[in-house]
């Protein structure tokens, strides 16, 4: 594929990031990946909404069908499980308003290549999201901005019905990570990161893969794990050390950037947000404003 073809494909993919329509052809994937049946979809939404009113455990900022469907899709279309997730999400928002409220979302382009993605979404991987912690300079911006950046990436991502169904796979690259970085990760920050990873976020999390990591990092990870809720997500965390062949057993190189022995071109958060701003519309602005972000 030539440079012009690659550029054209990326521009089409960037435009598609604003797509808010359910594709009828994706109903089979929704059934396989989310247990979603068009015949019972509306009934499940109504049941979830009734649970929210009857139990009174949370007060979501939205209650419309499209919003509630995100939580159902993230929990195999089971209203009770979706309700538990929605309670976690709502509590997380209430406890951490600074991660959303009046945040200049476009200002997070400063994170550069700390977060990257691959705009090649497959049913077995979903959207591949890469976090390169070693690219972060703690002197430039606080660790809270890392949480804000990851959260923003996910909030915008799940506006797409396609990604609500396909979900995502996380790749945590620890190359360049030192104690200079690690000393900023307090238990409170670690819990915030785990919540964003999937404990309290309506993302169909396909897996979390850690590469270029030492035993020290793995030990710290398991320490923080004890502070988090018991969840099936832990079964999908894999440590690969420095072994790319181990990573390839879990993620097809067809979906990976060349840096990891793959065939794809990664897109930095900086470039992605720049393109989002270029192609955004009134619906996007309204959604962002409702979430609490500053919208010009």
Image (cartoon, rainbow, N blue to C red):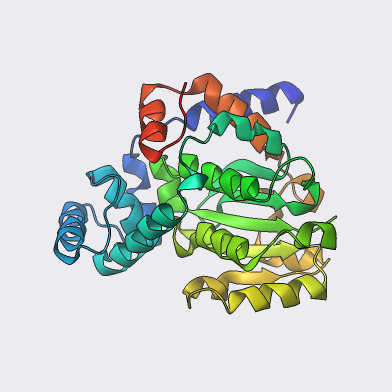
Residue at image position (72%, 45%) is 114
Q: Residue at 51% across / 61% down in the picture?
A: 195
Q: Is residue 144 left or right of residue 38?
A: right
Residue under the image location 35 percent in, 39 percent down: 23
Where does residue 18 sit, x and y in percent of width and height? 45, 30
Residue drawn at x 79%, y 65% is 245
Q: Quadrant of the N terminus?
A: top right
Where is residue 272 drawn, in percent x and y? 61, 32
Location of residue 166 with respect to 234 vertically, above or below: above
In this rendering, does residue 213 appear at all? yes
In the displayed structure, 112 sits above or below 51; it is above
Of residues 143 and 124, which is closer to you in this image? Answer: 143
On screen, residue 76 versus residue 44, left or right, reads: right
Of 157 and 108, nearer the camera is 108
Instruction: Give x and y (percent) for residue 169.
Output: 58, 56
Q: Is residue 12 left or right of residue 239?
A: left
For the question of whether residue 261 can be seen, the reply is no
- Total labels: the figure holds 0
Indicate the quadrant where residue 242 lies: bottom right
């Amino acid at each position: 594929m030539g440079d012009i073809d690659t550029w054209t494909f990326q521009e089409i993919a960037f435009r598609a990031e604003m797509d808010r329509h359910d594709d009828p052809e994706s109903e089979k994937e929704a059934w396989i990946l989310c247990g979603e049946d068009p015949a019972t979809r509306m009934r499940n939404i109504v049941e979830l909404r009734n649970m929210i009113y009857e139990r009174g455990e949370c007060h979501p900022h939205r209650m419309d069908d499209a919003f509630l469907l995100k939580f159902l899709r993230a929990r195999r279309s089971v209203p009770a499980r979706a309700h538990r997730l929605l309670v976690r999400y709502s509590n997380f928002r209430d406890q951490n308003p600074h991660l959303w409220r009046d945040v200049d979302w476009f200002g997070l382009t400063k994170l550069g290549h700390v977060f990257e993605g691959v705009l090649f979404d497959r049913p077995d991987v979903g959207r591949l999201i890469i976090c390169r912690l070693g690219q972060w300079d703690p002197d430039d911006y606080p660790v809270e901005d890392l949480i804000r950046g990851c959260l923003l990436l996910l909030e915008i991502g799940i506006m797409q019905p396609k990604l609500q169904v396909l979900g995502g796979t996380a790749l945590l690259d620890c190359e360049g990570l030192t104690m200079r970085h690690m000393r900023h990760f307090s238990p409170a920050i670690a819990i915030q990161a785990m919540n964003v990873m999937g404990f309290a976020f309506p993302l169909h999390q396909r897996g979390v893969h850690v590469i270029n990591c030492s035993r020290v990092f793995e030990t710290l990870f398991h320490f923080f794990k004890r502070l988090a809720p018991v969840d099936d997500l832990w079964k999908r965390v894999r440590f690969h050390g420095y072994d790319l062949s181990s990573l390839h057993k879990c993620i097809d190189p067809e979906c990976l950037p060349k840096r990891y022995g793959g065939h794809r071109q990664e897109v930095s958060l900086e470039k992605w947000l720049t393109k989002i701003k270029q192609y955004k519309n009134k619906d996007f602005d309204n959604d962002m404003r409702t979430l609490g972000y500053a919208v010009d």
